[in-house]
Amino acid sequence: MVQHLIVPVDGSDASWRATDVAVELARRCDADVEIVEVVFDELEVADSAARLTDRVEQHGITDLDVTTTTLLAGESVADALALQIEAHPEAMLVMSSHGRGRSAALLGSVTEELLQLTFGPMLVVGPHVTDGRFDGPIVVAVDGSTASETVLPLAAAWGIELGVEPWIVEVTSPDVQTAGDVAESAYPARLARKLASQSGHPVQFDVLHGRDVDQQVADFADSMNASMIVASTHGRTGLARFVIGSTVAAIVRHAPCPVLLLRPPHMADT
């Protein structure tokens, strides 16, 4: 499915945590890993290359093809990474949600810029991710909008790749009255049936209750020992909102597992 994983690092230990996740995912997917650092001065290229080589050796990875690349940025870190991704159409970006090194790969800055520049999936590793075992279910967050549902085929594909089941979840407010459990679960149940039919693999569903969408999704993922959470960066209903920098960023902050983000294709002109 994915043949090449690109991992941006910035010199901080936080940014390198994404490397551990990428390595585990590469082992499951038979992919290779490219660790990338962006610098702004040509004089820094040699030092960067040496740093990357040393860190890879410290990780002691011998069973995978791991390469290192130093990019010289002209305008911004995001621009340099976007060009690297464009040169590898088979690649997926795996990056930490926060870093405090030279290029500061922060969610809401570099990550958000990349989501504006690219349309491929991006696996974001938040501060509470302790490992990347990828042997638990995939939690798919939807909110009733077409935009949030664009991630469903991606979640199904990853479920097949990893050999795990997707769980489609919707968060409803405790203030919302419904006619019963059947009516309440009708929406995620319909999506689960459709996705199972299309993919030929089982898909589960559940309805979560709470005012904090991000916390409910993160807690559910934790209870399921989920491999990842999959969410669109944009989506909207009266009950929930998925917008980079708000709910999605909060999910990343609280999630016990990596979060796979996808910007809906129809947002190209937005």
Image: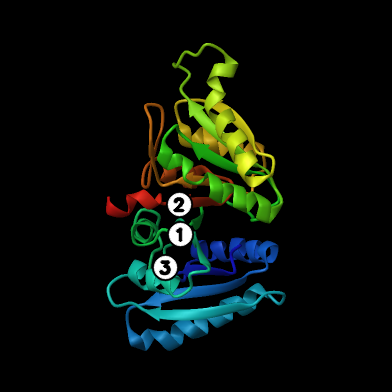
- Compared with 138, 9 (above or below) is below
Q: Which of the colour schemes (rainbow, by chain, secondary structure, one colour) is used?
A: rainbow
* Residue 101 image label: 3
Q: Is residue 230 visible?
A: yes
**Label 1 vs label 3: CA separation?**
25 Å
Amino acid tagged 2 = Leu
Amino acid tagged 3 = Gly
Tag 1 and tag 2, C-beta contact below 8 Å: yes
Q: Which residue is mark 2?
A: 262
Give the residue displayed 48% in from the left and 18% down from the top: 174
Give the residue displayed 59% in from the left and 17% down from the top: 181
Residue 69 spot, x, y in % from top left: 48, 80
Q: How many marks?
A: 3
**Label 2 vs label 3: CA separation?**
26 Å
Q: Determine the secondary structure under disc 2.
A: strand
Q: Earlier in the sequence, mark 2 or mark 3?
A: 3
Q: Which residue is outermost to the top?
A: 179
Where, by quadrant of the figure, is residue 220 drawn?
Answer: top right
Q: Determine the secondary structure under disc 3.
A: loop
